[in-house]
Amino acid sequence: MTTIHVSKNDPSAFSTLQEAILSIDDRHDEAIRIEVAPGIYEEKLFIRKENIEIVGDDPLTTVFRYGDGRLRRVWNV
């Protein structure tokens, strides 16, 4: 399994989840895990890839907010 990191504070990580998703080859065969560091991420997502797991640290600290006022939290259940 390949792991990709998203963080607003780590320069070696992707700064948005959408950038991380777009970096994945459309023809990937293996499972991809995207780990998202705590923060408020304001972005709309377009995911058209399979076999991707998106995991945040905590539902209270890893937040995805859409520009239309809707709020989503992402965490590992």
Image (cartoon, rainbow, N blue to C red):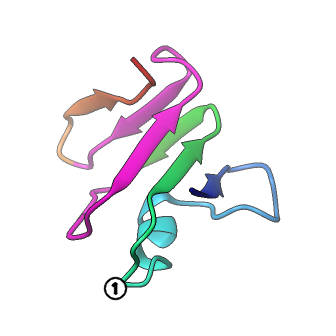
- Mark 1 = which residue? 27
**Dominant SS type (magenta):** loop
The residue lying toward the viewer, choosing from 25 and 58, is 25
Quadrant where the N terminus sits is bottom right
Q: What amino acid is at disc 1? A: Arg
Magenta span of residues? 43-67
From the viewer's perspective, tell me whether residue 22 is left or right of residue 62.
Answer: left
- In percent of the image, x 26 and y 63: which residue is there? 50
- Compared to residue 32, the image places residue 70 above or below, namely above
Where is residue 77? Give x, y as percent: 39, 17
Q: Please tell me in which quadrant of the rendered image residue 64 appears.
A: top left
From the viewer's perspective, tell me whether residue 40 is left or right of residue 11.
Answer: left
Q: Residues within 10 Å of mark 1 (few under 14, many from 20)?
A: few
Q: Could you say whether the residue bearing mark 1 is in a helix, strand or loop?
A: loop
From the viewer's perspective, tell me whether residue 6 is left or right of residue 27.
Answer: right
Residue most extreme to the right: 11
- Compared to residue 25, the image places residue 36 above or below, namely above
